[in-house]
Image (spheres, coloured by chain):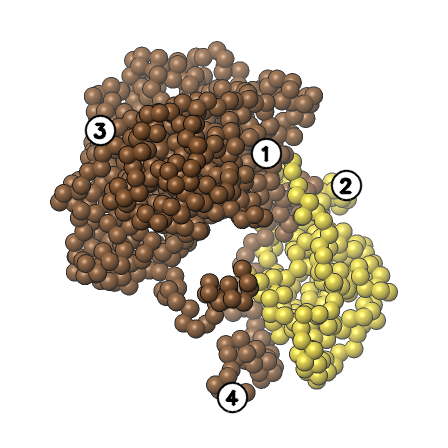
Amino acid sequence: MSGSDINRRDFLKFMGLGGVGAATLSGCDMPTTITLEEGKEKVVAYLAPEEYAIPGIGVTFASTCKQCPSGCGVHGRVREGRVLKLEGNPDALNGKGLCQMGQASLQGHYNPDRITQPMARKGGALEPVTWEEAWKLMKEKASGAAQGRSAWFTGTVSGHQSVLLSALNKAWGSKDHYVYEAINNAVGEAVNKSVLGDAAPAYRLDKAKVVLSFGADFLGTWVSPVHFSREYSKFRTGDRGVLIQVEPKMTLTGGNADLWVAARPGTEGVVALGVANVLLSKNQVDGKQLPQAALDVISQYGVDKVTEISGVPGDTLVRIAKYLNERSPSLVLSGESAHGHANGYQNAMAAMMLNVLLGNVGETIEASNSMAFDELKAKHGNSKAMLDFAAAADAGKYDVVFFTGANPVYTAPDHLAMAEKVAKVPFKVALSMFPDETTMAADLVLPLSSPYEEWGTSVSPYQPTDAAISMSQPLMKPLSAETKSLGDILLSMLKYQGIKDYEGFDDYYAYLRSELDGLPGSVKAGKDGDEFWSAAVQRGVIKVPTKAGSLKVNLGDVSPGGHQSGGDYPMHLIPSSNQTMYDGRNANLPWLQEAPDQITKIFWDSWVEMHPKAAAKLGVKEGDFVRVESDQGAVEAQVYIYKGVHVNAVAIPVGRGHEEYGRYAKGNGVNPLKILSSIVDGKSGELATHATRVRISKVGRSEELPRLGGSEVQVGRRLVNTVSADVFKRTEGA
Amino acid sequence: MFVSNKFLSKRRGKGVGQGKVSQCLAMFFSVLASVFIVAAAQAEVPNAKPPTGTHSGEDVPQPIEFPHDIHADINGINCMYCHTYARRSKVAGIPPTSKCMGCHSIIATDKPRIKKLTEYWENNETILWNKVHDVPDFVHFTHEKHLQRFVFKNEGMDVANVSEVCAFCHGDVKKMTVAKKVKPLNMGFCVRCHEANDGPSDCWKCHK
């Protein structure tokens, strides 16, 4: 072999042969004392094992992932009393799939920063206390709260936890339960409710031939990503569906799109109107589905005007319209980057208008079959809840507030001054697994068990076809004896309040058994108590009857709303959410911190995505620090230059920049949510997360970006073989 | 309780053979093997060339001085009666205390070691044994595969003589009281035996 024509693979083969031959295993006879400490390790024998427990062989149990509100079913592999690996439960909505957040939720369970005992604020600092002291404090400070002077602030809740929460609030004479999710589809739900009469209809990606998505990152964070990923694979196989993504920053879904269009942030509705205009005028689509008012608005948005407002070229609009016209049925979605504006509701309404115009309602948008048990349904969060809470706390409405499953002190923008407003509440109780920002601001901290240590039921907020209750069961014994499940704490509180209905139950498990026993015979399919319970726990889901829904069409005003210029702040800020950090709750999981961002391949830190033209104008290169300043404050991070962001926008990922939240999260990166301007969506009252304008300036420092790969080209290594379209057409005859 | 089929189903695998190694490598190894392997196969285990090499391990004190000789030699109890997981799992497993008590709630209850055992059992305490045989974490060793090859799928092999197979790597445990490490259990020891017995020689078979 001459040196010039040996490639890497041959070299390795050659070295492999030579290496083994030459060494003749001489190095392999080193004593194992180098790698092992003989006789120092313990080996624990079972006392009296279950029949199925074989050391070294895993047994799987079904449970439910709580890492995001989707509530996917999981199978956990348990070996020697430890849960080791999670996969999707094939019987659940997510099927066999489980996203990286779910996979990493084991690191939440085993996290070294978990709270292991109750803590109470003594002289300014949180100090460990016993449960007796904690309950004593609850008795003194909380149970005496006057009628209506208490509130709960939670993330998405469902199932029997939700039932107990409602009962507790009723007992305390309070109606206030704030359900908050920083990443939500509340604007879309408001439009769905108004137009279709169904806040969460079934989106049938699998039936669609073309999907036009205005910023709905359904493969990343939108509504139920694992479920949609499965539907997406059906959409892409066979007669391959076309995906068009209109958004200012390339999301994971945008990266998969056939056509990715960078519209000026906030003008998604205008683009939708422009597409409708082309469909009606050029493609002769019948407009009789639309009310006259809508047709009048559409007629004002000719191609030239739309191009001027949105920056989307006319031929792109024509191309989108052509796809939509030629391939039916289609599906038009809108998500975060379209909703997060002062005119977010109008953007979502314009997208819905396209669905109506193209006849998708009833085809690819179907009525959801909502589950029969209303009290168990998910209370899905939104960001208006946080704004409302901030106002109420500021006005001194509460004596006691309970926080669980939400971290408003971290996710709230600085203009809300959430920490100060929370501090105004005289007694704050955090029920939490981790020392996050909100927990550390509390007066009493009650340690929660992990989702894999407790019994429970939950219901997914998005249940398109079948309705199901998802079961949680302990996959292993609690790692810490002092932690309690939320259900158990709620039950104890109810019992303390002397509510008769709950006095007979020793613990949450007993309550759940009794509740499930009380389900109607149609759900239990003729099985008695124990048999039904075993089947439910084994399968992980209980299929329940549904109420068939129906859709109406009542399109509202589709006018796109005003578009303001930025003045001193020329650029748009896009706080982009992704499937690693989500809304920041995953920042304490090292697996997700070190998992490279799917688009930029950066990890462990924050970055600012800039278009090459914008970077050239500012005179920065990759790795340079820039200051991103809004009217509310500034953050500094390194620049990542690429074309997947609108030329007048910068994108900073959400989820890092924690001030608390354990060793892996604290002090890493910046939090772009802090500098959001105080803009809300006019119609729904949701926080307009994508409406902030910023100016960018150089800081003058530069460092190498922590980034996997580090190169955008293959350097001749042919890792992915490609042919140009011309060659393909010539040789494959397409 | 739910038990996934995939963990209960029999492991696939051919036992012996090295289909994936190139012919050239196989030939090379067989030549190499003939240089090293001098020991003749013992009569009790057909179709096997036992590994060579010795090691002088330290005495490892145990919470209860378990006498292997009384059980396996004098009373002739099969190794797999107690180490029941060996043929099903990667680890042979220390027998659960319930297994000990199965006999010792009746047999030899007056002996001091049995009294100690009973004390553990009655207090619901697990016994923390000190590990004698171990391989590093980067080595995937499975008892199940080795027992399949040398015992259950080995023509002419009598399962009653399984202790001879165990002795390949653990020495003559039935002559010991508390087990002691008498074989090196290092990579050279493993690889030479694999070569002599046509075991797989892919790196990833063990390092995965």
Residue A361, x across and y down, in percent: 48, 30
Using a 10 Å C-alpha cutoff, classify the residue at mark 4 as few (fewer than 14 neighbours), some (14 to 19) or many (20 or more).
few
Image side of residue A345 versus residue A497, left or right: left
The residue to which callout 1 is attached is: A540
Q: Are marks 4 and 3 in contact (CB under 8 Å)?
A: no
The residue to which callout 2 is attached is: B106
The residue to which callout 3 is attached is: A421
Image side of residue A257 versus residue B202, left or right: left
Real-space CA distance between mark 4 and mark 2, rounded to the nearest whole angstrom: 77 Å
The residue to which callout 4 is attached is: A2
* Type of amino acid under label 1: Gly
Real-space CA distance between mark 2 and mark 3, rounded to the nearest whole angstrom: 70 Å
Q: Chain of mark 4?
A: A
Using a 10 Å C-alpha cutoff, classify the residue at mark 3 as few (fewer than 14 neighbours), some (14 to 19) or many (20 or more).
some
Question: Which mark is in front, 1 or 4?
Answer: 4
Question: Which mark is in front, 2 or 1?
Answer: 1
Real-space CA distance between mark 1 and mark 3, rounded to the nearest whole angstrom: 41 Å
Please name the color used to draw chain A: brown
Q: Nearer the viewer, residue A256 or B130?
A: A256
- Residue at the extreme bottom of the image, as rendered: A2
Identified at 33% across, 19% down, the residue is A176
Q: Is disc 4 in the same subunit as disc 2?
A: no
Q: Nearer the viewer, residue A307 or A630?
A: A307
Q: Secondary structure at mark 3?
A: helix
- Tell me, yes or no, if residue B200 can be seen here: yes
Q: Tell which circle, 1 or 4, labels the residue nearer the N-terminal end.
A: 4
